[in-house]
Image (spheres, rainbow, N blue to C red):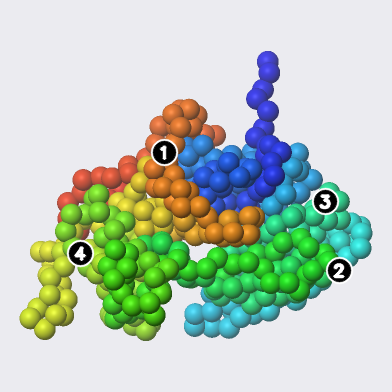
Amino acid sequence: MTHPSPPSLPPAKFGIVDLFAGPGGLDIAATIMKDEGVESIGVEWDDATRATRAAAGLLTTDVKDVAALGPCDPSVVEATVLTGGPPCQSFSVAGSRKGHQALDDVKRLATRLAGHEDAASFDVAWKEVKAETDAMSDDRTGFVLQPLRWIMEANLKRRRPYEVIVLEQVPTVLPVWNHFVKILRGEGYAAEAHVLHTEDFGVPQTRRRAVLIAQYDPNNVLRKVPFPKATHQRYRKGAERLPARAEQDKRTLFDDDDVKPWVSMGDALGATRGTEFVMVSNYGSGGDPKNRGRRESREPAPTVTGKVRRNRLYQLRKDSSGDIVIRLEDELDRLSAQEAGLLQSFPAAYPWRSTDVAQQIGNAIPPRLSLHILSMALLREPPQDKWFTLLNEWRPQEDSLLQAGPPGVVRRSASPQVSPLISSSAPGRPRTWASAKSSAK
């Protein structure tokens, strides 16, 4: 009896191995860029998230643990590009110094992984570092060092460094990325790290990501690294939305006509939300849970997290002074999985699987932002307009859906789950997809 070969990355001009790949926020962007010689394979731990990837037709390694793989493994040995968004929960600085301590620990340990001239020396250092991270109270702290291990092993063991590296996480991780920049320059990379705002790139949501881009260029490590430039208006509370492009043409020559208006929730959800609404965020403003943020449908959504289902939506009403009026009888259905995905710029047809979909969506990097980042990192030029059309119109292939099984089925999993894209719950009641269990990702 013959067995199918395990999935592996085919040779490509830009062959990406995506660590902590999630449901495919970066990998779906890579498929859109296929004609530019881009292929990708993801490494993902969570079975439910792997089911979503399978239904979307994304290539995923059989081995689920990033720590159990390396750049010499046959499934990823062809990769020329390393990307990843390691877990960030242990770096939260809210309310204590634990997050700051975790950042300091990672920077200290990262330094011990740098500057090795042979694989044997590196292996000794990695063994010591891993022993220390394994002993930490939060073992996720060490995950952020995994991309650095892959980078060093590609150079010392595979003898072929990655041509491009892209790492992203919440802004809290920026000090780690800045430290990695110094290390990578010593390894022959031109590297920089910056915080990007997702609404600057047409994502209908305010979200900030700390992004590191490194390009192998041993003779010019101090050169400037091209980063994406904003294409859309930055959102600020109380700011007026720019007029549409047709109206911009009538403005003066002193205005910046290259920047489009921000993309609003109403723009993204026009097919499912026929009237104006207000979203009341699950999170309190200024740390006060009673002072929950409010966004109108003409504004971008607040940051989509794994608790996005707790956000409440109401029909938009204002009093005579223009203040928003919230009435219980005006409450609308909460966001469906499809709608939450749209606010992250995933295609409407994205085949979300299992009952932890909220967590999958909240953890993901927005595909539209990924297109901007990958285009600049790989091609050193802005993304093509047609890619965004292809992203919006993307649909999974039928054979991918058949391979993944019916919605919610996780192959080789003991507990298949179901996650409808849109349900018909009564107004104000959570839909069944909303179980937002915690994930190691």
Name the amino acid, label 3: Arg
What residue did someone put label 2 on?
A: 115
Q: Are marks 4 and 1 in contact (CB under 8 Å)?
A: no
What residue did someone put label 4 on?
A: 277
Q: Nearer the viewer, mark 2 or mark 3?
A: 3
- Rendered location of residue 137, percent (x, y): 63, 69
Secondary element at tag 1: loop
Name the amino acid, label 1: Arg
- Rendered location of residue 310, percent (x, y): 31, 63
Q: Residue at x 64, y 77 (%)?
A: 175
Q: Residue at x 65, y 64 (%)?
A: 213
Task: Tell me if I can see residue 245 in this picture.
Answer: yes
Mark 1 or mark 3, earlier in chain:
3
Name the disc covering residue 160, or none.
3
Q: Are marks 4 and 3 in contact (CB under 8 Å)?
A: no
Mark 4 or mark 3, earlier in chain:
3
Name the amino acid, label 4: Phe
Q: Nearer the viewer, mark 1 or mark 2?
A: 1
What residue did someone put label 1 on?
A: 395
Q: Residue at x 72, y 61 (%)?
A: 215
Q: Is residue 34 above or below residue 403?
A: below
279 or 200: nearer the viewer: 200
Secondary element at tag 4: strand
The image quadrant where one finds the C terminus is bottom right
Task: Tell me if I can see residue 41 in this picture.
Answer: no
Secondary element at tag 3: loop
Q: CA distance from mark 1 to mark 2?
A: 45 Å
- Rendered location of residue 1, percent (x, y): 68, 15
Q: CA distance from mark 2 to mark 3?
A: 16 Å
Q: CA distance from mark 4 to mark 3?
A: 53 Å
